[in-house]
C-alpha cells in the first residue's frame, strides 16, 4: 500500500512568495520606464574590463553593448522571473531578488553611460576596497552576537583603533606596529565592554553607546590637543597594494581580489576563517549553543562566560583591524570622526547577512558598491544627486528586513545576560 505524502504550504509562505513576485515585476517595469522608455536607438555603452596602468592582469577586449536592446532584455527577464515567482514560487527567493537587483543596476549603468565608456572593472575593484571596513565591522558583530552579546560599540572601537594605528605608526615609522596597536586597542575596548556586559550585566546597548561616546570624545580631544600642531604624530603613510604572483594576472578576477593592500587580504581571510570556525569546529558549535541556549550549553559543561569573553574580545580585534583600514590603509592620517558611521553600517550588513560571515561580507559589498557608484557617476555627470544613489542599498536592506525574502532572526539569547544558578 502506497502512502501519498502531501506537502502543505502555509498561507504566509504563499503570500510572501507572491509579494516577492510582485516586487520583481515592479523592478522589471521600473527598468523599462526609467531607463528604456524614450531612449533613442543607435546608442551603445562600453563597459571597460581592464584595470588601470600598473596592473599585471592580462588585457581583454572591452564589452560594447547596444544600450536600448540591453535595457529591454534586462527588463523582460526581470518581468518573466517575477511572473514565474508568482505562479510557482522559488525556494531561494533571496537569490532571485539579488539577481533582479543586479539587472536593475546593470540597466542603470547602461543608461548612465550611454554613448560613453564606463570602467566596470574599476568600480568592482573599488567596491571591495570600500566594503572592507564595513565587512570587518559586520564580522565583529557576527562573532560577538553569535555568542549572545550585542555590540553596538563597534564604531567607537574602530575610531580609537584608527587613531592608535596612525599615532603608533608615525612614532615608530612602522605600519606593522600601527596595525598591531589598532588590533590591541580594539581588543582593550571590547574587553571593557565584555566585563560590563557579562560580569556586571550592564545593559549591552548602554555599554556600547558609552564606548562610542568615549571614543568620539577622546579621539577628538587628542586630535585637537596634540595631533593638529604635531604633523610628525599624524603622518603614518599607508600600506601599498600587493600583487599576488600569477593570481593577479587572471583577467577581471585578478585586479579585483589579488591586487590589494594587506588589510583587504586580511579581511577576506577573516571571512573564510570565521565561517570555518563557526560551522566546522567544536568552538563554533559551543559559540552557537551559547548564543541560542546558554542554559543547555552550561548543563553540558560549556563555560558560557568564557565563550562570551573570548568571542567579544576576538570581535574587538576584528574591529581594530577595521579601524586600521581608515588610518594606515587608505588615508595615512587621522581625521575627526573619520569612521563616518561605518561601524553602524556594518551592523546593518550583519543583520542583512543573517549573522553569517559570508552573508555579512556579501551585504557589505552592496554598501561598498553604492559608495563607489556615487563617486563614479559624478565623473559621468549623471543628472541625479549622489545622495539619492546612496539611498539605494538602504532601501533594499529595509525591503529584505521587512520580510520579502524572509525575516532575519537573531540568536535567541542575543543581548540576554546569563545568570548561572
Image: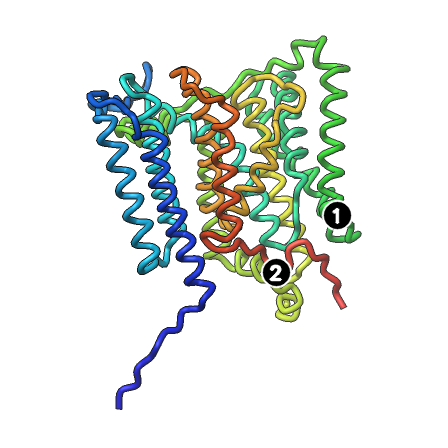
**Image check: 216 left or right of 248?**
right
Answer with the quarter of the image where residue 366 lies.
top left
Residue 154 pos. (x, y %): 64, 38
- Which secondary structure lies at badge 2? loop
| Label placed on residue 412 | 2
For the residues labelled 2 and 1, the Cα–Cα distance comes to 21 Å
Query: Which is more N-terminal, label 1 or label 2?
Result: 1
The answer to whether 286 is drawn above or below residue 158 in the figure is below
The residue wearing badge 1 is: 195
Which residue is found at the position 76% from the left and 50% from the top? Answer: 203
The answer to whether 147 is drawn above or below residue 152 in the figure is below
User: 149 and 407: which one is in front?
Assistant: 407
Residue 415 pos. (x, y %): 68, 53
Answer with the quarter of the image where residue 336 lies.
top right
Residue 374 pos. (x, y %): 46, 24
| Label placed on residue 376 | none
| Residue extending farthest front | 38
Which residue is found at the position 45% from the left and 22% from the top? Answer: 384
Residue 244 pos. (x, y %): 35, 28
Amino acid at each position: 500500500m502506497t502512502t501519498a505524502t502531501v506537502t502543505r504550504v502555509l498561507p504566509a509562505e504563499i503570500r510572501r512568495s507572491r509579494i516577492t513576485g510582485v516586487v520583481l515585476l515592479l523592478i522589471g517595469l521600473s527598468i523599462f520606464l526609467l531607463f528604456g522608455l524614450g531612449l533613442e536607438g543607435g546608442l551603445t555603452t562600453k563597459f571597460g574590463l581592464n584595470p588601470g596602468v600598473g596592473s599585471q592582469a592580462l588585457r581583454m577586449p572591452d564589452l560594447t553593448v547596444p544600450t536600448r536592446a540591453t535595457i529591454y532584455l534586462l527588463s523582460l527577464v526581470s518581468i518573466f522571473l517575477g511572473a514565474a515567482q508568482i505562479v510557482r514560487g522559488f525556494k531561494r527567493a533571496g537569490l532571485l531578488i539579488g539577481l533582479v537587483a543586479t539587472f536593475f543596476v546593470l540597466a542603470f549603468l547602461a543608461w548612465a553611460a550611454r554613448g560613453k565608456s564606463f570602467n566596470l572593472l574599476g568600480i568592482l575593484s573599488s567596491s571591495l576596497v570600500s566594503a572592507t571596513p564595513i565587512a570587518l565591522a559586520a564580522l565583529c558583530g557576527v562573532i560577538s552576537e553569535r555568542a549572545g552579546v550585542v555590540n553596538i560599540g563597534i564604531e567607537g572601537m574602530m575610531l580609537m583603533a584608527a587613531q592608535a594605528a596612525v599615532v603608533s605608526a608615525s612614532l615608530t615609522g612602522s605600519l606593522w606596529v600601527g596595525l598591531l596597536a589598532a588590533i590591541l586597542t580594539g581588543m582593550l575596548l571590547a574587553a571593557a565592554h565584555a566585563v560590563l556586559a557579562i560580569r556586571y550585566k550592564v545593559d549591552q546597548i548602554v555599554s556600547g553607546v558609552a564606548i562610542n561616546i568615549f571614543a568620539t570624545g577622546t579621539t577628538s580631544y587628542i586630535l585637537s590637543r596634540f595631533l593638529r600642531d604635531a604633523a610628525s604624530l599624524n603622518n603614518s603613510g599607508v600600506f601599498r597594494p600587493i600583487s599576488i604572483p600569477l593570481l593577479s594576472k587572471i583577467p577581471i578576477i585578478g585586479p579585483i581580489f589579488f591586487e590589494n593592500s594587506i588589510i583587504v587580504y586580511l579581511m577576506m581571510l577573516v571571512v573564510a576563517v570565521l565561517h570555518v570556525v563557526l560551522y566546522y569546529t567544536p568552538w563554533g558549535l559551543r559559540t552557537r549553543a551559547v548564543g541560542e541556549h546558554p542554559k543547555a550549553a552550561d548543563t553540558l559543561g560549556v563555560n558560557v562566560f568564557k565563550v562570551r569573553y573570548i568571542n567579544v574580545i576576538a570581535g574587538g580585534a576584528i574591529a581594530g583591524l577595521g579601524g586600521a583600514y581608515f588610518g594606515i590603509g587608505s588615508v595615512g592620517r587621522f581625521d575627526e570622526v573619520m569612521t563616518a558611521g561605518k561601524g553602524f553600517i556594518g551592523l546593518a550588513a550583519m543583520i542583512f547577512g543573517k549573522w553569517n560571515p559570508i552573508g555579512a561580507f556579501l551585504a557589505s559589498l552592496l554598501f561598498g558598491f553604492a559608495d563607489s557608484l556615487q563617486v563614479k557617476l559624478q565623473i559621468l555627470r549623471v543628472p541625479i544627486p549622489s545622495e539619492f544613489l546612496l539611498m539605494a542599498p538602504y532601501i533594499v536592506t529595509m525591503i529584505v528586513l521587512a520580510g520579502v525574502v524572509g525575516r532575519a532572526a537573531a540568536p535567541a539569547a542575543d543581548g540576554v545576560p546569563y545568570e548561572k544558578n
